[in-house]
Amino acid sequence: MIVPPPILDLRGKLSVNGIYPRRDLDDVKYIVIHHSGVDVDSSSEEIARYHIGLGWATIGYSYVCRWDGAIEWALDLETQGNNVARRNPECLGICCPGNYTDKPGRVPQVAAKDTLVSWLLAGPLPGRQVVGHREIALPGYGTACPGMLI
């Protein structure tokens, strides 16, 4: 059994303004890597408040990997967040706060993201495809996300 990386469990502790639908883990086909597009080390709570302002239920990502390598767990794996327009049931989102359009990610943050992805693939989500947001965005929803993180 693979031991999970150190994770700060924030599920049920973030600001909310609604409830996302539930899904079966078999529905998840992709682990999707994102950047926030803003060069700030945003916390899961800050992202949740921003997403609520967009009319979402709460944070759209399941995990957030901070600049210092801390991993925050924001949503149950069975919770369908908002992270890839019109593809959310099949996507589990990991956000790395910052803008990596023209620069690589911070070393501790990228290492945390890679460790988290390895654990997810070895444990609860084997065989899933790991992609950047831009790789699976549908026409009309194009993005440069996650920049140079993938």
Image (spheres, rainbow, N blue to C red):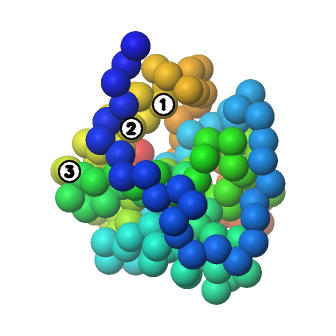
Verify CB contact (< 8 Å) between mark 1 and mark 2.
yes
The residue under the point 74% across, 28% down is 26
Q: Position of residue 20 (x, y in %)?
A: 75, 60
- Choose mark 1 or mark 3, whichever is in front: 1
Q: Quadrant of the C terminus?
A: top left
Q: Which amino acid does label 3 sit on?
A: Pro
Q: Distance between the residues labelled 1 and 2?
A: 6 Å
Q: Where is residue 56 in the image (x, y as percent from the top left)?
A: 71, 74
* Residue 86 appears anywhere in the view: yes
Is 85 situated above or below 114? below
Is 37 situated above or below 80? below
Q: Name the residue under label 1.
A: 120
Q: Position of residue 116 (x, y in %)?
A: 39, 38
The residue under the point 53% across, 35% down is 130
Residue most extreme to the bottom: 53
On residue 108, the disc is 3
SS for callout 1: helix
In the picture, residue 92 is in which quadrant? top right
Q: Name the residue under label 2.
A: 116
Is 80 situated above or below 26? below
Left or right: 126 with respect to 103? Answer: right
The residue under the point 67% across, 57% down is 81
Q: Earlier in the sequence, mark 2 or mark 3?
A: 3
Q: What residue type is labelled 1?
A: Leu
Q: Distance between the residues labelled 1 and 3?
A: 18 Å
Is 124 situated above or below 95? above
Verify CB contact (< 8 Å) between mark 2 and mark 3.
no
On residue 36, the disc is none
The residue under the point 62% across, 42% down is 77
Q: Where is residue 108 in the image (x, y as percent from the top left)?
A: 20, 50
Q: Distance between the residues labelled 2 and 3?
A: 12 Å
In the picture, residue 43 is in which quadrant? bottom left
